[in-house]
Image (tube, rainbow, N blue to C red):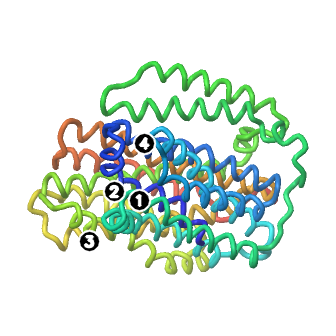
Amino acid sequence: MPGTLLNPLNSSMIAVALVGIEHDFGSGVASATWLISAFYIAGAVGQPLMGKLADRFGPRRVFVIGLVVVCAVALLSPFAPDLGVLIAARVLLALGTSVAFPCAMAMFRACLSGPTPQSALGAVAAANSASAAFGPVIGGFLVSWWGWQAIFLVNVPITLIGIVLALVRLPKVPGDGGSGHGVLRELDTPGIGAFVLTLVGVLGFLLSLESGPTWALIPVAVLGGLALVWRELRAATPFVDFRMLAANRALLSVYVQYTLVNIVFYASFFSLPMWLEEVRGDDTQTAGLLVLPLAGVSVLAMPLASRLIRRSGVRASLVIGSSALLVGSVGLQLFGATVPLWLLIVVTALLGVPNAFNNLGLQTALYQTAPRAVMGTASGLFQTSRYIGSILSSSVIGLLFGAAVNTSGLHAISWVMIVLSVLLVGVSVGRLRSRTATGD
């Protein structure tokens, strides 16, 4: 759980530190936002990569090494001489913090037998949701008292606790090999390179839509995608196993649903604070507190989701989660400049509760459908879906808010959320199965 805190915490705290960093380095806001984009891109690649390493060398070993990297980078980052070095540090932080979820899932699958370990999965999901919810609040406190350097240094005690607990409590789970011989070949570095090229091309193009599309990135993404498919269909140990995904439709459905869930969630999570400040005239602190239920209430709902999955299975959790997401998305249509406080709280809570049911439901479905031998890699790709969903939501917000943040733009974003939520309800009811048919 301490390791799981790190990735969402570092992805959210940076938002409140950008102004201070930009002032110190004199870099300009556009350059400073690369601290966010670089972390997202590196995390999207790092999650499946760390999962692959966990499958290869064992999850405990990879987990501890990742936390050691985070600790060292966190100690050195406050002394970065320029913005470029700080961006490189953020890349290393993204890679180091990417170890937690895939290593946890690989360890659970290797060590726990019998029914799905709902309590363990729920604990990891709760840690993830809690750090995402309170990241901006914690970051704001740290920056106001000790400057932007504090959001890096806060990683040090967390990683030290995680390392000690890992060495004392976690079992030594062997990987599928155990030595470093031939590791570069087995990790499929050409496939990783093609994956990175595709991801940078797609996400870079989407991130450019707000200010003006960078059309040159489209051929980069297409060539990267073609190279990725060509390589992975021929690799002995592919980084992205397309054959396995084609044969395991349930696992592919999990990835698609998780991407859609995160588009809807982050569309509200990112757009509502902007709308509250620009249209209602709330200050930053008030807007943050009003949006807190959107992420924080999911922590309180996690035990209910866990109990529901244990009693009724994954499908019930996803049907409830996607239905509540639909109701909350429709509720945004009621928002205007004079929206009453009680309605604000009710709608944000409705949008937050599904986070527990959808996230834990899909995490459980991942555990049930992914083959045991590649659980780390499969879990990493699951987290990559989250990054892709969050960046797609940013593109939607940039396009629909356009030059100004206003209520009509929020309603347009709400319609996108409604359409995707309807799709999620349909998939949850009609396609997802709570038991895998893979024979694993």
Q: Which of pointers 4 and 2 lies earlier in the amino acid sequence?
A: 2
Label 1 is placed on what type of residue? Met
Q: Secondary structure at mark 1?
A: helix
Q: Which of label 4 and label 3 is nearer to you?
A: 4
Q: Are marks 1 and 2 in contact (CB under 8 Å)?
A: yes
Q: Position of residue 266 (x, y in %)?
A: 39, 53
Q: Are marks 4 and 2 in contact (CB under 8 Å)?
A: no
Determine which residue is flagged by label 3: 346
Q: Nearer the viewer, mark 1 or mark 4?
A: 1
Badge 4 element = helix
In depth, the one of 97 and 256 nearer the eye is 97
Asked whether residue 156 appears in the rendered view, the answer is yes
Along the viewing direction, whichever of 28 and 111 lies nearer the viewer: 28
* Quarter the C terminus occupies: bottom right
Which residue is identified by label 4? 392
In the rendered view, does 247 fall on the left or right side of 177? Answer: left
Q: Calculate the distance from the C-alpha at mark 2 to the C-alpha at mark 3.
A: 26 Å
Question: Which mark is on residue 16?
Answer: 2
Point 25% across, 61% down: residue: 331
